[in-house]
Amino acid sequence: MHISKVLLALAVNASLGSACTFGFSGSRNFNTGDLSGGLSCRIKILRSDENKESKEDKVDLHENIDCGKGCKTVKYYGEEYEFCHNGVGGDVGSMADGATVQRKGGGNKVNIIPDGEDKKDRRQDPFSSTLSHYYWRSNIRC
């Protein structure tokens, strides 16, 4: 009986201290046929550090955010997180310098840009082209 209580306490403590990956992405779609296309920006949270680069289907939270300078608050596992950024930079699909996330109610503000990692991706076919830029910061307490 005593061992099961210890294991339960360890499981609760492990879940309270879990790490997340927080990210921003900017994508520009070009339609080479009629020159239409658009810019989209997103924020994401992953409960673990798996698939952090661009696997949107594995993301726990994935929401659009205005590509202009600004902030957005989201709810995730009972907590509120505020994502802020300085808009899209001169490089198509790239965020300008400065993007943060902070857990409301006393969490530390964490720099995703410039302190995190990033990856650029370009996809092209005969009818369209997409340029994306992903930014993320791992091992942040949820």
Image (tube, helix red, strand yellow):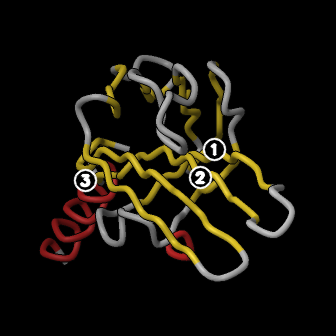
Sequence-wise first label, 3 or 2: 3
Residue 15, located in which quarter of the rendered image? bottom left
Q: Position of residue 127 (x, y in %)?
A: 73, 78
Q: Which residue was labeled with disc 1?
A: 41
The reply to whether the C-beta atoms of the residues labelled 1 and 2 are less than 8 Å apart is: yes
Determine whether, in the image, residue 109 is placed left or right of residue 28: left
Q: Nearer the viewer, residue 136 or 95?
A: 95
Residue at 36 percent of width and 52 percent of height? 21
Cα–Cα gap, marks 3 and 2:
38 Å
Residue under numbered circle 3 = 13
Percent from the top left, x then y, of residue 113?
Answer: 34, 30
* Amino acid found under the numbered disc labelled 3: Asn
Label 3 residue SS: helix
Q: Which quarter of the picture shows residue 141?
A: top left
Disc 2 residue type?
Ser
Q: Quadrant of the C terminus?
A: top left
Q: Secondary structure at mark 1?
A: strand
Quarter the N terminus occupies: bottom left
Task: Name the front one of labels 1 and 3.
Answer: 1
Residue assigned mark 2:
27
Among the two numbered marks 1 and 3 on one chain, the one whose residue lies closer to the N terminus: 3
